[in-house]
Image (cartoon, rainbow, N blue to C red):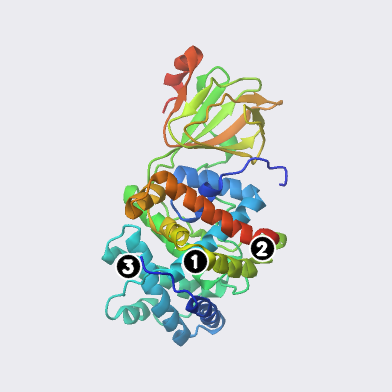
Amino acid sequence: MSAPGGAERPAAASEMNDLLARVAASGDREAFSRLFAFFAPRVKGYLMRIGLSPDQAEDLAQDALLKVWRKARLFDPSKASAATWIYTIARNLRIDAARRLNRPLPDHEDPALLPEEEPRADVELERAQRDRRIHAAFDALPPNQRAVVMLHFYEDEPHAAIAERLDLPLGTVKSRLRLAFGRIRKELGDLA
Amino acid sequence: MTSIKHHPKTETLAAYAAGALDEARAVVIATHLDLCDACRAAARDFEALGGVCLEAAEPAPMKEGALERFWLRAGGARAERAPASTRAANDFDLGLARPLSAYLKGGLDAVQWRRIGPGMEQCVLDAQGYRKGVLRLLKIAPGVRLPKHSHGGEELTLILRGAYEDEIGEFRRGDLADLDDEDTHSPCAIGEEPCVCLIAASAPLRFKGLAGKIVQPFIGL
C-alpha cells in the first residue's frame, strides 16, 4: 500500500468539491472530465482491492461516475465532500452488484441518491466542518493505524483479511482499528 | 428519540459504513440509524473516513478511451433535474427511512407469524442476498423468558415494539443489543404488549440447559 497523499490531499479535496459544485450548477463538462480523471481510477482501484476483476471494476467505476454526472444537482458542497459522496455511491453499487449475483432483486433505489424528506438540521449542520476534521485526524494517525483504517475500507472481509495481508494476529488488527477509530472520534469530540 | 440507551459497537458502525456487513446485519443497523441521531452521525463520520480513504487510494488506471466511452454513454443529456425536494442527496447518505420496509411487505401488522414455542413466534425474512446471514423477527409474549443462550457468532437484536429485560439491562424501542459469541443472555419480555425484535445472526442460537435443548430444534434455523 502506498502512503496516503499527505499534504497535497486537502487541496485536492477542496478542488474536487469545487469541480462537483460546477457540474451541479451548470453541467460543466470540462469540470466533470477533471473529476473523472481523478476519481474513476480511484474508484476502480477501490473495487479491485475489494475483489472485483479489472473489467468488472472498470464497468462499475463507469457506472458510479455516470451516477455522479446524472445526479450532480443533488450534491451540496456545504454538506459533505465530493469524495465522501462518490465513495458512498461506489460502495452501494458494489453491494447491489454482489447482491444481484446471488439472486434477482428489484433494483433498490440507491440511498445515496435519495433526498431526505425532512431536515434534521441540528445534527447535520456541522457536516462540512466534521469532514475536514476527519481528514485531519486521519492524516495525524500513526502509519500503522492509518494502514489498517484504509484496509478496513478496502477489504471484503475486513478483520481477517487485514490480519492476513499485514501478517498480524487478528487481535492486533482489532485493537489498532479500535485505537484509530477512538482517536478520530476524540478529535471530533467537541463537535459531537 | 433520545430515549435510546443501547447502541451498536463502534466497530459495527464502521463495518456498516465500509459496506462489510452481511445484508441481514446491514438491515438491522440501518433500521437503528433511522431511529438514532447519534449513531447516524457516527456512521456518517465513518463514511467520510471512507471518502478520505478513497482520495488516498492507489489509483488503477482506466482503460484507453474511458472518458470518451463515458461521454458516449452519458449522451447529450444534461444532468438530471433535482426532484421537488430542496434537500441535497448528500444531506444524508444512508436512505434510512426505508431499510426495513423493503423486506416487510405490508408492514409489521401483516407479518405471518409461526409459533416456535410457548409465547414465542417468529418470521424469517428473505435477506440472504449476499453474504451469509439470517434475518428474522421474533415476537415474545409478555412475561415469557427465552432460555439462556449464546450465539454461534455475532448477533444484532433491535427492539421494534414492546420491551425486554436481560442480564445487560432493559431494551426498548430503538435499542440495539450488539452481542458476540461470548455473551449469553436470557431475555424476558416486560410490559403489557408483546416484544417484537428484529434479529440478524450469522448462526443459530445455542441454548444452555434442558429447557433450551427442548426448544432448540424449533428455533434453530
Q: What residue did someone put label 2 on?
A: A124
2 and 1 marks in contact (CB < 8 Å): no
Please indicate whether residue A125 sits to the left or right of residue A13 in the image: right
Q: Dot 1 falls on which chain? A: B
Q: Secondary structure at mark 2?
A: helix
Q: Residue furthest top?
A: B210
Dots 2 and 3 on the same chain: yes
Query: In front: A37, or A109?
Result: A37
Q: Dot 3 falls on which chain? A: A
Q: CA distance from mark 1 to mark 3?
A: 20 Å
**Amino acid type, mark 3:** Asp
Q: Secondary structure at mark 1?
A: helix
Q: Give the label on residue A59, or none.
A: 3
Horizontal and vertical percent for residue B5?
Answer: 68, 41
Q: Quadrant of residue B108?
A: top right
Say which residue appears at 57% left-offset and 46% top-offset: B31
Q: Give the label on residue A152, or none.
A: none
Query: In front: A15, or A161?
Result: A161
Q: Dot 2 falls on which chain? A: A
Q: CA distance from mark 2 to mark 1?
A: 17 Å
Q: Is residue A132 positioned above or below B107 on the image?
A: below
Horizontal and vertical percent for residue A23?
Answer: 51, 81
**Amino acid type, mark 2:** Glu
Q: CA distance from mark 2 to mark 3?
A: 33 Å
**Amino acid type, mark 1:** Gly
Q: Quadrant of the C terminus of chain B?
A: top left
Say which residue appears at 57% left-offset and 57% top-offset: A183
1 and 3 marks in contact (CB < 8 Å): no
Q: Residues within 10 Å of mark 2 (few under 14, many from 20)?
A: some
Query: In front: B212, or A148?
Result: A148
Q: What residue did someone put label 1 on?
A: B51
